[in-house]
């Protein structure tokens, strides 16, 4: 069952790759700017490894919920939860909450998401972390913007999808 206020934001390669060695696969400044614009003023939900991979946290002007299985975890400026259900309960009154990773968190939240904000890079990457396969027939495209990044030498698209 999808929750109307749970959205996923992610940059994926065409083979659904999202990361390797707890790091991003590519550096796209415009994608990072888009992430900031979309998530600022909202709650972001992530796993502990995603938080620890951020260059600096907490990110400004966002409520942080970190899912962990380590009872002694403490991250200043962040709320700690120990399950997906606990995270969903904490965001139930939010207009929109964003799931920002990592791989296992995306996989667990995917059935509950009502919107996907994708940056789709039109090439495959070698990775150890993948996003769930998206059956595009189950989603309605509300926005698409195509780009080419000269520095990286690949095309990518921004897609906003809503569950049908």
Image (cartoon, helix red, strand yellow):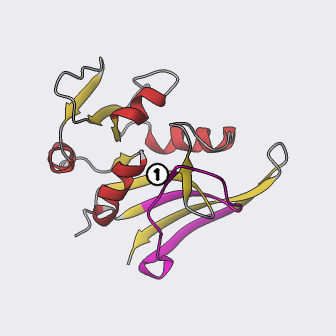
- Residue 7 sits in quarter: bottom left
- Please tell me whether mark 1 sits on a helix, a strand or a loop: strand
Q: Report the residue at 44% width, 41% height from top.
A: 39
Q: Can residue 53 be seen in this view?
A: yes
Name the spot of residue 20 as percent of width and height, x first.
56, 43
The residues colored magenta run 116-145
Is residue 134 shown above or below 57?
Answer: below
Q: Can residue 44 be seen in this view?
A: no
Is residue 62 shown above or below 108?
Answer: above
Q: Report the residue at 34% width, 33% height from top.
A: 48
Is residue 79 shown above or below 82?
Answer: above
Q: Nearest the camera: 138 or 62?
A: 138
Task: Give the side of residue 27 with respect to residue 19, left or right.
Answer: right
Q: Nearest the camera: 42 or 49?
A: 49
Is residue 95 shown above or below 45?
Answer: below
Name the spot of residue 46 as percent of width and height, x first.
35, 40
Name the spot of residue 134 as percent of width and height, x first.
47, 70
Say whether residue 99 is magenta.
no
Q: Report the residue at 34% width, 65% height from top.
A: 114
Q: Nearest the camera: 144 or 81?
A: 81
Task: Give the side of residue 32 with respect to residue 101, left or right.
Answer: right
Query: Which residue is identified by label 1?
Result: 9
Name the spot of residue 72 as percent of width and height, x first.
18, 21
Task: Give the side of residue 62 with respect to residue 36, left or right.
Answer: left
Q: How many labels does the image show?
A: 1
Q: Nearest the camera: 69 or 116?
A: 69
- Residue 101 sits in quarter: top left
Q: What residue occupies the far top of the structure in this picture?
A: 76
Screen quadrant of the C terminus:
bottom left
């Amino acid at each position: 069952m999808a929750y109307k206020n749970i959205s996923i934001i992610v940059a994926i390669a065409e083979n659904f790759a999202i990361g390797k060695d707890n790091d991003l696969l590519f550096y796209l400044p415009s994608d990072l700017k888009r992430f900031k614009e979309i998530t600022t003023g909202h709650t972001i939900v992530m796993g502990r490894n995603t938080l620890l991979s951020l260059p600096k946290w907490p990110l400004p002007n966002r409520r942080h919920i970190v899912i962990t299985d380590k009872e002694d975890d403490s991250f200043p400026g962040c709320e700690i939860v120990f399950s997906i259900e606990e995270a969903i309960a904490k965001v139930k009154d939010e207009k929109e909450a964003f799931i920002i990773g990592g791989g296992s968190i995306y996989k667990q939240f995917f059935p509950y998401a009502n919107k996907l904000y994708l940056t789709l890079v039109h090439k495959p990457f070698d990775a150890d972390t993948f996003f769930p396969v998206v059956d595009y027939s189950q989603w309605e495209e509300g926005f698409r913007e195509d780009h080419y990044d000269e520095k990286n030498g690949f095309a990518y698209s921004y897609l906003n999808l809503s569950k049908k």
